[in-house]
Image (cartoon, helix red, strand yellow):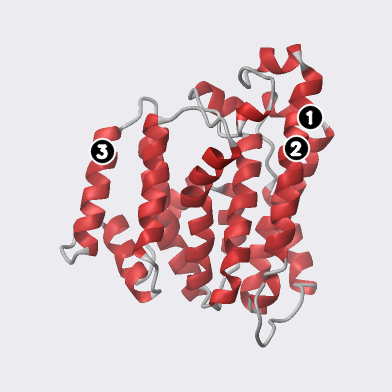
Amino acid sequence: MRSTELHRQVFRSGSKTYFNSSIFFPPDVRDDVYLLYGFVRVADNYVDSIPQQPDEFEQFVARYRSALDGTPSGEVIIDSFVELSNRRSFDPAWTEAFLNSMDLDLHKNVHRTLEETLEYVYGSAEVIGLYMSRIMGLPEAADHAARMLGRSMQVINFIRDIAEDNELGRIYLPIGESSLSDLREATARADAQEFRRFLSTNLERYRGWQAEAERGYAYIPRRYRVPIKTAADMYNWTASQIESDPFVVYDRKVKPTRARIFARVMRNFIAPGPEAPTGGRV
């Protein structure tokens, strides 16, 4: 099934870095990426809107489950995702985990422990890595690296979007690991040393998970590796910007320009990384 302009617009509006990277996939894979992100962005929009739309989200979930059981919803975003799920052999449990994380956004505002944060991250980001692995036809040996790529990117999103999430009353980082009562700018500036330490701890975790993800690049065929590596490189750039000045998260949303993304794409076309192994695990 080919993506529609609706899929592309929904994806573009919600993910600048990954959308601009994904246009360099071959057309068949690119279409499937648009189908995937059309679905996850629509679900995400229901829970991130102001005010939130819990009834609409519940109806969306019900229509998805009905479509999965064989009764088309009549909505292109849902029905195209179900077709994609069947064609690419997605595990339905992944989608249930994703929907559970979206539901958490309706009911849970503060994540105090790393375990709570990672429960949310599994459904909101790690399963996206698994979806992408199936779309690219990678072996199951690549699944761990795919999950870690989703996890690491999501952690950078949490750090980058602290100010935005404050407006929604949300704290995704494990705030219980710090002496900070919250992540409002006034609180962070009142104890700047602790705020810097807290962000540094989570940036260190990001690097560890990203390193695990990068070991999986060898499983990705060259023609798919460029957009994946480009997106990851841009998250590395974002992390470095925040590390150099943690309080920048209160001044602006740190994102690479389109020119920076395209320049990295060209560099990765020249040196895309190692070739796929013949066996083994990541």
Earlier residue among tags 3 and 2: 3
- Circle 1 residue: 197
Q: Which mark is residue 243?
A: none
Quadrant containing the C terminus is bottom right
* Residue 260 appears in the rendering: no
- Amino acid type at mark 2: Thr
Residue at x 58%, y 55% (from the top left corner): 150
Count of labels shown? 3
Earlier residue among tags 1 and 3: 3
Q: Secondary structure at mark 3?
A: helix
- Circle 3 residue: 56
Q: Where residue 90 sits: x, y (%)?
A: 40, 68
- Amino acid type at mark 3: Glu
Asked which quadrant contains residue 199, the reply is top right
Q: Where residue 268 sits: x, y (%)?
A: 75, 67
Q: Are marks 2 and 1 in contact (CB under 8 Å)?
A: yes
- Amino acid type at mark 1: Arg
Q: CA distance from mark 3 to mark 2?
A: 37 Å
Q: Where residue 135 sits: x, y (%)?
A: 48, 71
- Circle 2 residue: 201
